[in-house]
Image (tube, grey):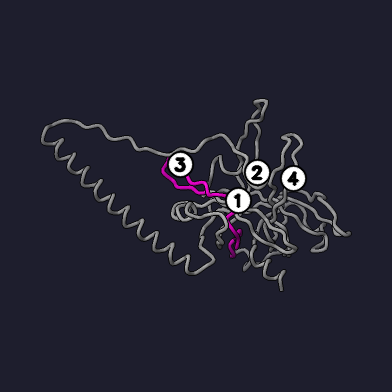
Amino acid sequence: MQQEKTAANNSVVIIGKIMTELEFSHQIYGEGFYTFALEASRLSDVSDLLPVTISDRITDKNDLSVGTLIKIDGQIRSYNSFVEAERKNKLILTVFARDVKIGLDESDLKQNPNEVQLNGYICKPPIFRTTPFGREIADILVAVNRSYNKSDYIPCIAWGRNARFASRLTIGESIRIWGRMQSRGYQKKSEDGQTLERTAYEVSISKIEYMNAADNARAHDEEANAEQTDGAESAVENNAIDLTIINAENISETHPENAADFNTSSDTSTDTGINGATDFFNAERHE
């Protein structure tokens, strides 16, 4: 019963194509685990290349050849790995397969090819910013409980209204997230000045809410009040602009436009996560 409850906290379904040969990872009590990269398509032309870990007891590994289209049901797992070259721990994410289907039919291909659901707790203060193009982004780190008193720490990114909601979250609050797992490349400067190519993995949030219904009602009221305030401020600004135009026409003068102010994010990657875990807050993002 406890395992079923914790399994419901963390669910991922991904349909994609195997892009690399299976590589042996580790063995526990005679059970072998292998890793490979799976390509999952988005609605756009962009694809995500995601790491997958699978047991040799789930399916014959000889059936998992490069180019095979499969469907995976599993969980997002995290673990700390010491990187000798950087002399520090990094948070490693993987899709842990609990079931796999080979030979997909038409109904499988009509499904969402990349779907994640998480129930967890905020374990770091959210990072909120606005890009030079005016897009609002919030990064959060979510702790998701699983069996045997373990937890997975999963970086997530929210956009727009979801980003504003996420920015108000505090450490320890329980939330529910829907979204997809995505990959993105970025560059990082090493201590000796070399430019290193890196890949980060995170959950792109499509929906987020509190686990508690009362908290959701409070959040809805806060958002409604914020929108009313923003609307009133916009009306004042519009009136001011109209008056400026009238005055300019009356006195036949030209007034330069005011430059928009934006909060820009740094291009320098920052190590974040549990125990100095991973680089995932910076670099280009695709919603």
Closer to viewer: mark 1 or mark 3: 1
In the image, taking residue 75 as reference, residue 156 lies left or right, namely left
The three-letter code of the residue at mark 3 reads Thr
In the picture as drawn, the residue positioned furthest to the left comes out as: 250
Label 2, label 3: how far apart the Cα atoms are = 22 Å
188 vs 237: above or below: above
133 vs 119: above or below: above
Residue beneath disc 4: 81
Residue at the spot x=64%, y=61% of the render? Answer: 12
In the picture as drawn, the residue positioned furthest to the right comes out as: 30
Q: Earlier in the sequence, mark 1 or mark 3?
A: 3
Q: Percent from the top left, x then y, of residue 63?
A: 79, 59
Label 1, label 2: how far apart the Cα atoms are = 9 Å
In the picture as drawn, the residue positioned furthest to the bottom comes out as: 1
The three-letter code of the residue at mark 4 reads Ser
- Looking at the rendering, the stretch of residues picked out in magenta corresponds to 111-138
At mark 4, the secondary structure is strand
Labelled pair 1, 2 in contact (Cβ < 8 Å): yes
244 vs 26: above or below: above
Q: Earlier in the sequence, mark 1 or mark 2?
A: 1
Residue beneath disc 2: 278
